[in-house]
Amino acid sequence: MHHFAYHNNELYCEDVPVRTIAEKVGTPFYLYSHATLKRHFMVFDAAFEGVQRLVCFSAKANTSQAVLKLFASLGGGLDIVSGGELFRGLKAGFPAQRMVYSGVGKRIDEIDDALEAGILMFNIESIEELELIDERAGLLKKRAPVALRVNPDVDPKTHPYISTGLKKNKFGVETRTAIEGYKIASKLKNIEVIGIDCHIGSQITESQPFKDALESLLAIIKEIKKFGIEVKYLDMGGGVGITYADESPPHPNEYAKSIVESLGDMPLEMILEPGRVIVGNAGILVTKVLYRKSGKTKEFVIVDAGMNDLMRPALYESYHRIEPVIKNDDGSIVADVVGPICESSDFLALDRKIASVKKGDLLAVMSAGAYGFTMSSNYCSRPKAAEVMVKDDQFDVIRTRQSYADLIDGESIPSFI
């Protein structure tokens, strides 16, 4: 459930007309519902009631300070993949002890910052990384808490670009390497083995791949126990999908039930890393129609949001519903909804049946709360969009739109030019 609904043919976010925000803020802008964000987090967490757990929101899905602050206030943790996300998480109020650091390419400075902060756990993605973290921890006189990220070779049945648990993917280590890695880790004096981790992909719409991955992890846990290695944390990553079009992803209760049943009586604390399932349907991208254009074979609706604002359609050919902010009785058209970027891949929808629109009309690109703003760029020297959050009948700009001056901030012209 989300809090975007029509009242008298006008789209509202909670109790605020979207049109009112557009008139105040301009377009394009991202719009988030506080009630939806809070509800989604609490429903996901409650699905694992009775299990020792820490729900670590996946920061890469949405790193806006207001969004992160809300989840921190609800007792959540944070799954991070960079030093920048560590910085953002600390600024938003997450205790470092509730942060888990994943990612295949951790730099020395990022490792050092995480060690100094005192994060809960590093998810190790290679033996070389394990050895480097041991070295850095020794130099800083720290002990580094770690889990090995296992690549269980499970097909998540999702888009190839967001599949991460197959043997051909760059993430984690295979089962045999993981077992050897745990043996190595147990002998390193600056390493404390506390967990095991996997993450098989994103936008997964079935429970079975998660069960298959868990089965692999439990087998490894039993194997390494023979060598005296016991883990406290089982990190199942994230990846639960949402409905963009006609998908039927598992409800958090169904997902949790499949995990808990497979876990049995193993005395492990669960770490869960939901991202999209929490924020995806809690946000929309609002854009304005600039022009209509008819070609010999195509009808085009040109809007002021482009692939620099929402990369997913260009990158993954992802589907986002596109709805009018104000409904009318002018029927429908089939058109490409495209942006102003000088790339043929700059589209929000292709050959899509949408409401007939005219210049100046507002459109809502739905389910844009995850991997929307976080993947945006300044391509074609376009300022990044504003972000707005609504709570009940009030709204606040949680990120101001970039100015042209912001585009060249930090640049300089060398003296030899």
Image (spheres, rainbow, N blue to C red):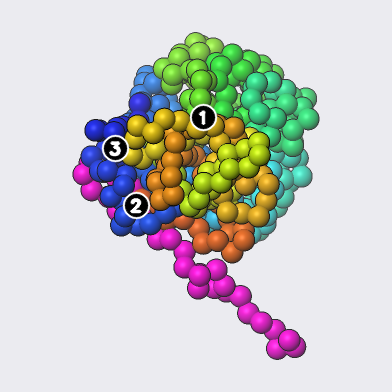
Residue 299 appears anywhere in the view? yes
| Closer to the eye: label 1 or 2 | 1
Against 140, is 229 above or below?
above
Q: Residue at x 53, y 43 (%)?
A: 301
Point out the tag, 1 or 2, that comes first from the N-terminus: 2
In depth, the one of 303 and 149 nearer the eye is: 303
Q: Residue at x 51, y 25 (%)?
A: 245
In the rendered view of the protein, which quadrant contains the N terminus? top left
Rendering quarter of residue 378: bottom right
SS under mark 1: strand
Residue beneath disc 1: 353
Q: Which residues are magenta?
A: 389-417
Say which amino acid is labelled 1.
Lys
Q: CA distance from mark 1 to mark 2?
A: 24 Å
Q: Residue at x 63, y 79 (%)?
A: 412
Q: Residue at x 41, y 30 (%)?
A: 331
Q: Position of residue 99 (x, y in %)?
A: 49, 43
SS under mark 3: strand
Against 94, is 26 above or below?
below
Say which amino acid is labelled 2.
Ala
How many numbered discs sit on the rendered protein?
3
Say which amino acid is labelled 3.
Glu
Q: Which mark is residue 22?
A: 2
